[in-house]
Image (cartoon, rainbow, N blue to C red):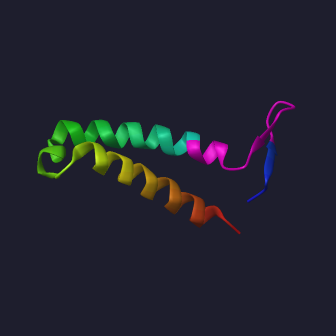
Amino acid sequence: MPGEIDLFALLVPGLLPILAGCVLLFVVLDLVLARLGFYRYTWHPSLFRVALFAAMFSGVSLLLWR
């Protein structure tokens, strides 16, 4: 994974596009889980949401890291 990416003549950190993709994926997954009523079965829904996003972002980042 490159350290920096040239985006329209602006250097951005290499993890920024991964973060943006994970945010979009998390929003969709969160809406689906909320509509299914999954959060009624979790101990602390807000903590579960944070942990889910952290796991998604870390997993994708580690998969793309070389």
Residue 7 among magenta residues: yes
Residue beneath the point at 45% across and 53% down:
54
Q: Residue furthest bottom?
A: 66
Q: Which residues are magenta?
A: 6-19
Rendered location of residue 3, percent (x, y): 79, 54
Q: Residue furthest top?
A: 8
Residue 48 among magenta residues: no
Residue beneath the point at 82% across and 30% down:
8
Residue beneath the point at 19% across and 36% down:
35
Residue beneath the point at 39% across and 37% down:
27
* Total numbered labels: 0
> Is 25 on the left-hand or right-hand side of 43?
right
Rendered location of residue 39, percent (x, y): 18, 45
> Is 43 on the left-hand or right-hand side of 61?
left
42 or 9: nearer the viewer: 42
Eyeballing the image, is 9 above or below 22? above
The quarter of the picture where the C terminus appears is bottom right
The quarter of the picture where the N terminus appears is bottom right
> Is 10 on the left-hand or right-hand side of 42?
right
Q: Residue furthest right?
A: 9
Rendered location of residue 9, percent (x, y): 87, 31
